[in-house]
Amino acid sequence: MQFLYPLFLAALATLAIPVIIHLFYFRRYKKVQFTNVRFLKEIKEESSIRSRLKNLLTLLARLLAVLFLVLGFAQPFIKQDDNVKKGQKLISIFVDNSYSMASLSQDAPLLEEAKRKAKEIVNAYDLEDRFQIVSHDLSARQQRFFGREQALAQIDDLTLTPAVVPLSRVFLRQQQLLNEDENPNKLIYYVSDFQENIADLEPSDTSFEYNLLPLKAVIEQNVSIDSAWFEAPVQMVNKANMLLVKVHNWSDQEVENIQLSMRMDGDVKPVGALDIDARSTYIDTVFITVLEPGIKKAELKITDFPVQFDDTYFLSFEVKQQIQTLVINENQPNRYIGSALASEEYFQKTERGASNLDYSSFNQYQLILINELNSISSGLSSALRNYLSQGGNVLVFPAANSDLTSYNEFLTQ
């Protein structure tokens, strides 16, 4: 047995105090006049035995109280068997290199702080010990043990990565390699900021010694592009298509002058400067004019420091020269629908009667309009469902006296 604070054992000298009190305990006797002293000897012997036993029990209780109090402050512990701990050790060190580690600590990014701590761990062990360096990359190289110098070199090579895996999966990788060796001296270290999306570690293997080293940024300040979407469902050529951009301020402080820009077709267009309140979002607008049809790629970017991995947002969209539109009529065409479609050159209209349809040609159209059909036949319903499953669009204008049963069967399937 050893003691965490052995200096407190000096307080055992206080055990002498109860002993001294016991030895120098004097009772003041009261003088009583006896007229008959026949039973005096018997009474004196019986009282003396009881008093002595009571004093000894009191002394023992005082000694135990002082002893346990001193031992409590000294904090005794049982040292593990040295024979078990001798020999080569296997140490697996996980260094978090996700983008969240780009946040600043006192004087450096968290990743650099994590690498420094990992190096301190490696240097704290003997030259004969072996090390596994694990990160979010989970590369094949990280499934081996190395000596000190190679382990330090691997730590130096770590960089930020977009790949993020939960710690439970990291532990399985560590457990797999450690269990391949019968060495009983196995230790695992985790150096991370332990973000909520990865901190699911619940190790059940008690044959390892686990050590968690949490890191925390000084100021958790970050602004990111949350999402982007078009106001209209269809983008047109030579039109000002409105794109909405949602920017999120995750920090507890207001941010000012966040520059938002957009790159498309090799051209960079500044959008503006944003001021966003703490823990809130801001939606800005960008107008995009497309001169030629086709699939377009755009890149939205903000200027934010120090966390920059979420400052760029990529999107792609398709712009068609025309929308091929099929109008299915019951009898006569609807002049209002015809006028609406004719007002935009973007819509290329084709009209067919309900009894004169080629279901196999539906995939040639981007939009199908059901114009006041009395009922939707089972064949048409099946063809429309197949068309919708392939990404088509259907717009329904029911007739005033339409068969609701057939419409409901189509719309609910």
Image (cartoon, rainbow, N blue to C red):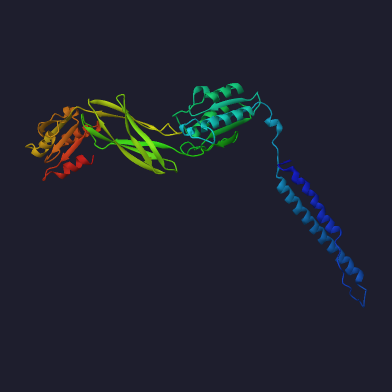
Q: Please tell me which residue lies in front, 240 or 21.
A: 240
Vertical comparison of 318 with 73: above or below: above
Q: Residue at x 19, y 43 (%)?
A: 408
Q: Please tell me which residue lies in front, 41 or 23.
A: 23
Q: Please tell me which residue lies in front, 406 or 157.
A: 157
Q: Residue at x 19, y 34 (%)?
A: 384
Quarter of the image where the C terminus is located: top left
Quadrant in the picture for residue 244: top left
List the single residue furthest toward the bottom: 35
Count the marks. Answer: 0
Left or right: where does residue 65 sit relative to residue 406?
A: right
Q: Please tell me which residue lies in front, 157 or 29.
A: 157
Vertical comparison of 355 with 29: above or below: above
Q: Residue at x 8, y 38 (%)?
A: 335
Residue 51: x %, y % from top left: 84, 63
Whether residue 338 is visible here, answered yes or no, is yes
Quarter of the image where the N terminus is located: top right
Residue 103: x %, y % from top left: 48, 35
Quadrant in the picture for residue 149: top right
List the single residue furthest toward the left: 332
Residue 66: x %, y % from top left: 76, 53
Left or right: where does residue 111 sit relative to residue 78?
A: left
Vertical comparison of 153 with 225: above or below: above
Whether residue 179 is visible here, answered yes or no, is no
